[in-house]
Amino acid sequence: MSDTFEKEEFDNLMMNKLKAKKMCVDYLKQHTLEFHECLDTDNGSTGIVVALPHCYDCPDKRLEAELSFYDSCIEARVFYTQNAASWVEESTNKDALYRLMNFINARVWPQSHDGADGTLYSANCLICPRIYVTEDDSYDITATAMVDNNIYDMAPLEVMDAVTVSMPQILNELSAPIFLLVLGKIDVETAMQLVREKFGME
């Protein structure tokens, strides 16, 4: 009886996808971010799509985020609009873009922050997304992070700030070098130099 009780109590305390999703929805409502819920019929995961306006350097001045909730983790994706994806699809500079993506993933180490000058928590690298072009013929440029549910349970504010603030900020800052390259306005060496300057590498 005691062992059963302890296991039930333990299970109730453990983060699961339903609890993770509820916490996410609470955060989005508290921060008045527009979102809608969805179901991924391919893998049965539940998800949330979030509109991220005011990304002024991005195509269409906005980004989108999608969070998928699994039994043990959350997949968080932040990506440019469909217009941006169409530019990539039509671009003749994809090889240069892939080289730039490789450079970004090797050299850019994004930090999450509280947006309040460190009064809530210090800047950190708890969430470290990969930035890439999707391989599903949609040509989305996306920043993706996989977050263990236990990490989300311990640091929910940091995780959600990373998804809704830090990851969008990175894509906003990378927008000019990426899309000037995609549209053939600059070469890859110039795009890399712009990334170095934006992220204080030199």
Image (tube, rainbow, N blue to C red):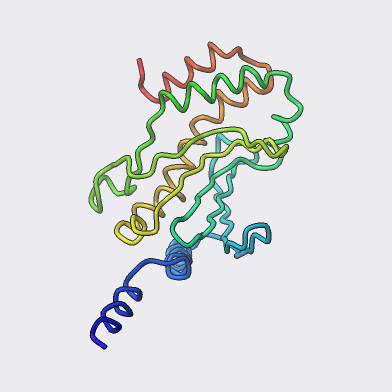
Residue 27: x and y in percent read 43, 63
Q: Is residue 61 left or right of residue 123?
A: right
Pick the residue in front: 20 or 116: 20
**In which quadrant will I find the N terminus?**
bottom left
Residue at the (65%, 38%) spot, across then down: 140
**In which quadrant will I find the C terminus?**
top left
Pick the residue in front: 5 or 109: 5
Q: Hey, which quadrant is residue 108 in on the image?
A: top left
Please tell me whether residue 159 is drawn above or below residue 71 in the rendered image. Answer: above
Residue 18: x and y in percent read 47, 70
Residue 65: x and y in percent read 55, 50
Q: Is residue 30 left or right of residue 66?
A: left
Residue at the (44%, 61%) spot, across then down: 31
Please tell me whether residue 127 is drawn above or below residue 16 in the rendered image. Answer: above
Q: Hey, which quadrant is residue 80 in on the image?
A: top right
Residue at the (49%, 42%) spot, across then down: 168
In this figure, what is the number of numbered marks?
0
Residue 199: x and y in percent read 39, 25
Pick the residue in front: 191 or 54: 191
Pick the residue in front: 15 or 86: 15
In the picture as drawn, the residue positioned furthest to the bottom comes out as 1
